[in-house]
Image (cartoon, rainbow, N blue to C red):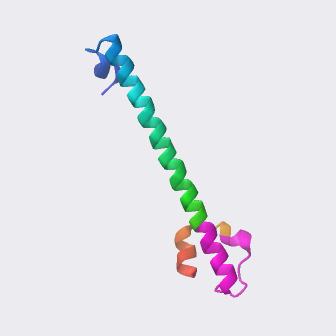
Amino acid sequence: MGLNEVTAGMTPQEKEIYFAHMEKRHKEEAEKIQLERERTRAYKESLIQDILAKGYNHNRYTEEQLRSKSIRVLEMMW
């Protein structure tokens, strides 16, 4: 559904309310995505530090090599 179809029967006041609501919704969604990215980065960093501290990798991988691996691979290593 296009934007014109959505706002076709709306008054200017209704359009203003609609766009303000959509802007707020998009901002909230962007904040949620940012928080999820930060949480994922922190989790990956925690996995890397745990692997290095516990010696699970038997010195086969450097910290940089571990950083290039996915979270799934790090979880399997840990």
Horizontal and vertical percent for residue 17?
36, 22
Using residue 40 as the reference point, say whether residue 12 is left or right of it.
left
Count the marks: how many? 0
Is 63 colored magenta in this rendering?
A: yes
Above or below — where is 17 with respect to 26? above
Residue at horizontal 63 percent and vertical 68 percent from the top:
45
Residue at horizontal 30 percent and vertical 28 percent from the top:
1
Above or below — where is 18 with respect to 43? above
- Point out the image quarter for the C terminus: bottom right
Residue 15 placement: quadrant: top left
Using residue 40 as the reference point, say whether residue 4 is left or right of it.
left
Using residue 6 as the reference point, say whether residue 41 is left or right of it.
right
Horizontal and vertical percent for residue 31?
51, 44
Above or below — where is 19 with respect to 58? above
Is 62 colored magenta in this rendering?
A: yes
Residue at horizontal 46 percent and vertical 40 percent from the top:
28
Residue 71 placement: quadrant: bottom right
Above or below — where is 72 with respect to 6? below
Residue 66 placement: quadrant: bottom right
Residue sitting nearer the eye, 51 or 19 = 19
Horizontal and vertical percent for residue 56?
64, 86
- Dominant secondary structure of the magenta stretch? helix
The stretch in magenta equals: 44-66
Residue sitting nearer the eye, 17 or 29 = 17
Residue sitting nearer the eye, 43 or 74 = 43
Horizontal and vertical percent for residue 36?
51, 55
Q: Residue furthest top?
A: 12
